[in-house]
Image: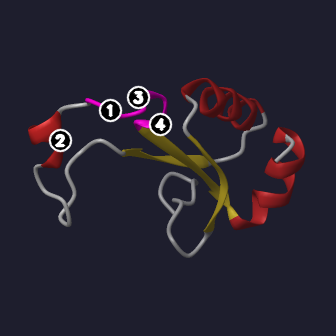
């Protein structure tokens, strides 16, 4: 523990939400913050090159891509807080 706060790790966290909506992830973060629940967010840029398809975006840009799904937000909470977080957020 550092500064009295347990860091979220792969072993003590659980996925609460996966969404493509920036608005939705912001609302969830607000609910968790107001209720003093620790959380972390992983943001995945779905348009960025990957090791399996390096450079594909450089060739095509965003032509034909659904920009509403460009970013994926994955919200994690502590395992012990997961039930409370689900109840608070309606997930």
Q: Label 3 vs label 1: CA separation?
A: 9 Å
- State left or right for residue 73 relative to residue 49: right
State which region is magenta.
Answer: 63-70
Residue 15 in picture, x, y percent from top left: 64, 59
Q: Position of residue 71 (x, y in %)?
A: 43, 38
Residue extending furthest toward the bottom:
11
The residue carrying mark 2 is: 57
Q: Which mark is residue 12?
A: none
User: What main secondary structure does the magenta stretch of the protein show?
Assistant: loop
Residue pointed to by mark 3: 67
* Identity of the residue drawn at 77% across and 58% down: 81
Disc nearest the viewer among 3 and 1: 1
The secondary structure type at the circle numbered 2 is helix
Of all residues, the one furthest to the top in this rendering is 23
Q: Is residue 24 above or below residue 14?
A: above
Residue at the spot of label 1: 64
Task: Say which element carries label 3.
Answer: helix
Quadrant in the rendering for residue 33: top right
Q: Verify CB contact (< 8 Å) between mark 2 and mark 3.
A: no
Asked if residue 84 lies left or right of residue 66, the reply is: right
Which residue is disc 4 drawn over? 69
Q: Are marks 4 and 3 in contact (CB under 8 Å)?
A: yes
Residue 10 pos. (x, y %): 51, 71
């Amino acid at each position: 523990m550092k500064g009295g706060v347990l860091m979220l790790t792969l072993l003590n966290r659980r996925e609460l939400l996966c969404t493509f909506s920036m608005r939705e992830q912001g609302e969830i973060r607000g609910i968790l913050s107001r209720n003093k629940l620790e959380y972390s967010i992983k943001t995945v840029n779905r348009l960025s090159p990957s090791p399996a398809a390096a450079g594909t975006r450089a060739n095509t840009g965003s032509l034909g891509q659904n920009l509403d799904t460009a970013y994926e937000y994955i919200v994690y909470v502590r395992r012990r807080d997961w039930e409370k977080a689900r109840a608070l957020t309606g997930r």
